[in-house]
Amino acid sequence: MLRTHTCGELTIENVGDTATLCGWVDTIRDFGGVTFIDLRDRYGRTQVVFNPDSNPQVLTEAGKLKNEYVIKVVGQIRPRPDGQSNKKLATGEIEFVVSDLEILNECKTPPFVPGQKDVPGEDLRLKHRYLDLRREKMLQTLQLRSRIIKTMRDYCADHDFIDIETPILGRSTPEGARDYLVPSRVFKGKFYALPQSPQIYKQIMMIAGYDRYIQVARCFRDEDLRADRQPEFTQLDLEMSFVDSDDVIGMIDGMMQRLAKELLGLDLQLPLQRLTYDEAMTRFGHDAPDLRFGMEIVDITDLASTCGFGVFKSTAEAGKFVRGVNAKGAAPKYSRKRIDELTNMVKDDFGAKGLAWFRCEEDGSLFSPIAKFFTEEELADLKSRFDAEPGDLLLLIADTWDISCKGLYSIRKRMGVELELYDPKEMHFSWIVEFPMFERGDETERWNAMHHPFTAPRDQDLDQLDSDAGTTRAKAYDLVINGYEAGGGTIRIHDSEIQKKVFGLLGLDEESAQERFGFLLDALKYGAPPHGGIALGIDRVVMLFAGLDNIRDCIAFPKTQKAYDMMTEAPNVVEDLQLNDLGIEISENEISDDPESISE
RNA sequence: GGCGCUGUAGCUCAAUUGGUUAGAGUCCCGGACUGUCGAUCCGGAGGUUGCGGGUUCGAGUCCCGUCAGCGUCGCCA
């Protein structure tokens, strides 16, 4: 080793010792006759002193140092003079007096320095990720990530799970997203698909008798990005045999309790709260609600059906819904202009036709442009249903179930932040359970699987598969943390008759099912145990545990919204020779502009 | 693919209703300084306001197009 210690470990205990440190020049304070440098590495910062008492030569040498130079210093540890310790540093009680300096490497003037007060723009950070990763915040987040994964693995190891790696080059699986494809050189015209999840493989492992499997699995989905979505991401993939929903949920309950305790010092009460899907949609309009605050949805469709306001009345009579939320105390803060913003949001984003509102005045009366269409009794009824008090703002959407859910969910989410209805540092864990087996496809009679086609229906719903498939509930469960879906899983079908029936409902005939994943169907016939599992989104868990709102900050090398890597400039063109090997020809009009050539 | 926000010095930002030579801090370069820790002080350099077009006597500012980053809807079972 070139060093004897790190920059984070020297303390008052080491006074008098001689040591060697290596690191990056973090800040320079040059007084002419004495120079201080904070030397930084992954472990911390140590103040090193260059002065003429120890070695005049070295003081001159120190004059050459600039930001982010990599240096090696030999010297002696001594306590700092009285009153000059730095409480911000773990090493702040001591300083390192340099007797010998070696510049290991110089550094070009960097576009930004890790310690600068204002965080640089994200494009710059991504382009020079090696500089960005030197920032303390990034370091902390990636260290947290490492500890989270270790804790997950330790927990699983303690519960007899076996860690198995599954292929990255596979074939298209029955997930719903677009695949990333890899052309085959040997089988020209054929493609591997990168896994959207190791779903099939882990089920095969159950059939093979490896009754508790985990993997920290990289997954790929070629869909558009969001603040909490990357095209490649990491899951803790888990599968168990001889279990039902409660067993998997209970296992993850324990894991969350351990994670919260070890990483956040929080004591989670088990079992974690559970909400059915129907309840979540009815009360919060979403299957991953943020349960750190209330502002629940109130349904007034029955009241609307008899009122004098045409829009409400006709909506109710059409079998649609009139629902709303009470934004407590929001009235003084929400001008007409801000209400218009909310209105535009639900119109533009979800196709709602409008947003009705009532303001509860000081005298307790309800004010609204549409109040005149309601009788005194109806207004009083409205007020009591929403529990409206002076200063409250009621926001209502009259539309389909779907639009009212989406619109009110987004209003609730936004106003929860704007009205500071919860402590952002608070953590809330819950389960959403009993998802529907199926949802309607667009303008077709056909059903789509809400999860994947191997999801088992609840035992008590088996009869409904034939009679009323839409009401069938699945053995499916999502882990929700602070309003984010942190994971989801199901118990799988291990009975070929039920599987056949589900395929039928999905419009998959036996032939095409056999074609797409016959190997799994075959395997299921060779002694498949009852099994099920879950996948936890590790990037999101890290994001939530770190209190961040952006998944890119939890990933060492993330991609931009266009799935572009600004540092390596991937994706990029390849040699014609490579394409020839693969039997691929690219038509001229399909080649998009080279991002590098158009950026400046 | 749609909608929205942003784009000004290496970096972070400012620039009144469209109006003189586009400013500040920081970084960088030169100088001073033996106790700082966002060191301080003096001096200097640094700009085709993302790119292209238009309106105007005059555009960083308004309009159109385009590129990039971000947010969001669709999409992601």
Image (spheres, helix red, strand yellow):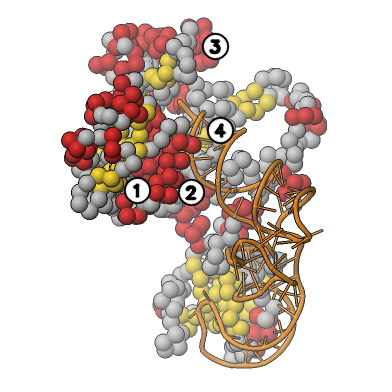
Residue type (three-letter) at the residue carrying disc 2:
Asn
Name the foreground residue: B4 vs A267: B4
Q: Is residue A178 left or right of residue A298?
A: right
Q: Secondary structure at mark 2?
A: loop
Earlier in the chain: of badge 3 and badge 4, it is: 4
Residue type (three-letter) at the residue carrying disc 3:
Glu
Instruction: Choose mark 2 or mark 3, whichever is in front.
Output: 2
Q: CA distance from mark 1 to mark 3?
A: 48 Å
Measuring 40% from the left and 20% from the top, which residue is drawn there? Answer: A439
Looking at the rendered structure, whether the residues under marks 4 and 2 are on a common chain is answered as: yes
Q: Where does label 2 land, which residue?
A: A550
Name the foreground residue: A327 vs A209: A327
State the image coordinates of residue A25 (x, y, percent, origin top left): 60, 71
Q: Which mark is residue A223?
A: 4
Q: Where does label 3 land, which residue?
A: A515
State the image coordinates of residue A85 (x, y, percent, origin top left): 43, 82
State the image coordinates of residue A534 (x, y, percent, origin top left): 38, 31
Q: CA distance from mark 3 to mark 4?
A: 25 Å
Instruction: Choose mark 4 or mark 1, whichever is in front.
Output: 1
